[in-house]
Amino acid sequence: MKKRYQFPVKKFDLTHCWMLLMSFRWFNVAVLGVAATLLANASNAQGTECQDASGRRVSVSGGSCPFGLTPVPRAPVAEPPKPAPPPVAATPPAPRPQPAPPPVAATPPAPRPQPAPPARQPSTAAVALANLVDKYTPTLGAKTANKILEGDARDIVFFFNETDSAPNGVRGLSGDIAFSNNTIRLCILGESKAPDEFIDWVKIDWVQQKYTIENFNLKLDRCKFDAVKSSDPKVAPYDLFAVERRLLTNNVNVETPALVDLAQLIAKKSLAYFATSEWQPFEVYQEARRAEAEKNLKLLRDGKLEGYGLALLVPELDVACGSDAADKQVLYEVASRGLQSFTEPNIRNKRRLTLRQGTAEAIFVQAKRRQCGFIVGDAAYLKPIVTALERDGQKVTIAPLWLKQDRVDEILKAVATKYKDADLQARRREQEQRDRDTEAARKLEEERQRVEQQEKLDAAKKANEDKEKQEDLKRMRKLVESRGQALVDTFNISARKHLSSVSQELLELKDAAAQRRMTDEQRAAKAQARRKERMADAWSPFPAWVADRAKEEWGFGDTKATLEDYGLAKWRSRSIEAISVKVEIPMTNRHIGERQTACWQFVWINDDEFNFTRNLLAVPCDKYPAAFKKWTDENLFKSQWKL
């Protein structure tokens, strides 16, 4: 049997250490690969890293960058190097006598372990915020509580109105929120410090996040917190409510009454968390637009720009000035897009523009006189104007968006196609309009002939009907006149008797001797006879008026009664004849030497079945129209006299 090779003891240190290290190489490479993978996953979990045009970076929660930012490309994770295969151990040579090893240096003592620095304690505000989130997690849920409470104090949190008072918002069957008529009514609660630029950016951010469609109508109001009081079951009529996060907690993260009310309304299903618009991405977006505008201005000064852009001079004016050599529609398109690239809402929201075109010299003079709100044109046209304006101390701002020449060529092509299509459509519309006019004229003539023929037939028919109607009216009026006149004559006799009886009584009262001679029985008989001659007290105030005139020494002549109206009135579901009589009373006063004619109107329901007069009315003639109108309505009177 072959003798097994034995290493000398004195060579064990160097050779065996080398072989042990090589045998552990695969394990070391595997550990390094796992560590690299874990580091890459941890980097991805931290959020999406975004950058603006100037290269400034910001980490944003979620999977996408907000409007105005682009994602930062990630560096590829280096794969761990493939380990080399372990070397094949060679047969060691025969041992040779070695000299004695040099003395080994003494190992220096190991350094003493230093104590670890004390752990950094969280601030009082951070602890209070964590406690506040924990407090509202049972009511709002952990996810909603974090979205509402955690973040920049300048962020704006939006809540959706789940009640029927929301004018446009509704949650559909799938649970998604939609707004009818592409309109959202928004109420910003409390004393908001958010600038108008941030509110305008919210609209852009919502479209970017696909909360709403593009070009939706946002109707904004600023409200007090009373609009969302938890004690009031009726939520104000808005689709969304917005509040700055700083108004939900104070400086030490202690809840405010506004947070309490909002949380209770969310618990009652009256409100729901909708979205949060973060301040930091807006700040980056605003700075990026500002930097882009400054870069465009510098490139324009240096003559390194090509294409079309816009120079802002006076934001308050809606007047655009441009080159007379450029296409009008191209200038309009460049102006519209350039204005939309600004962050200020008073500039972005310009819609109706007045365009003035002229040479560079003419437009420069108008700009100096503040007659141009902004100038639009290509770089060659804008550069001398902007340079001269800055030379004269006038501030000029270049729009952040600059359209390259190839994009302008596309606009020109689209405008030409639009003009061509518009011309064809105009010709088609003109021909269709001529056809419609011809057809309308034909139908109009047919209708005119038909109407003319129908009018002739109607006239002949009406003539016959009018003749028959007049004959019927004459017959009815003759019957009514006969019946009414009989009632008038009877009433006239009663009125005369009443006047005569009153006058006679006054004369008898003046004869004191005759009064003394009358016995009580005679006086009673006389009074009984007078009651039969007098009109009932229900005709008030006529009896009292007669007595007053008689006491004033007025004498009454023969009355004249005429029929004023006749018809049917309702009395307990019965239709009974009713009559109105006008009575003229001549009067003479010898003592003052004066004559007058009094006029009274009398109206009543003549119930022959029960021999009774009902609902009596007596008024002077000057008060008759209003009194009779009221009496007519109350008694459902329908005239058969005034037809």
Image (cartoon, rainbow, N blue to C red):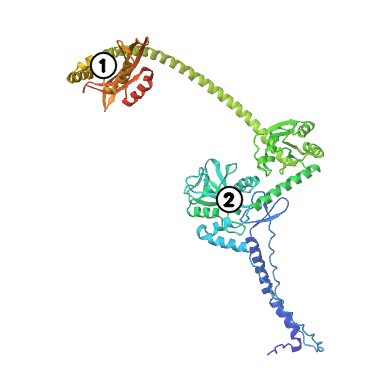
Q: Amino acid at mark 1?
A: Leu
Q: Tag 2's secondary structure? A: strand
**Frontmost residue, 409 versus 265:** 265
Per the model, the C-alpha gap separating discs 2 and 1 is: 94 Å
- Tell how many labels: 2
Residue wearing tag 2:
243
On screen, 182 above or below 279? above
Report whether 48 appears left or right of 102. Answer: left
For image coordinates 25% across by 18% down, the residue present is 534
Q: Amino acid at mark 2?
A: Val
Visible residue check, residue 151: yes
Quadrant of image for the C terminus: top left
**Frontmost residue, 434 versus 641:** 641
Q: Tag 1's secondary structure? A: helix
Indicate the quadrant where residue 344 lies.
top right
- Residue 186 lies, in percent from the top left, at 56, 45
Q: For the residues carrying marks 2 and 1, which lies nearer the camera in this image?
A: 1
For image coordinates 68% across by 65% down, the residue present is 79
Sequence-wise, which precedes: disc 2 or disc 1?
2
Residue 51 — which label?
none
Report whether 239 appears left or right of 630. Answer: right
Visible residue check, residue 498: no
Report whether 477 appears left or right of 447. Answer: left
For image coordinates 51% across by 21% down, the residue present is 440
Residue wearing tag 1:
509
On screen, 38 above or below 423? below
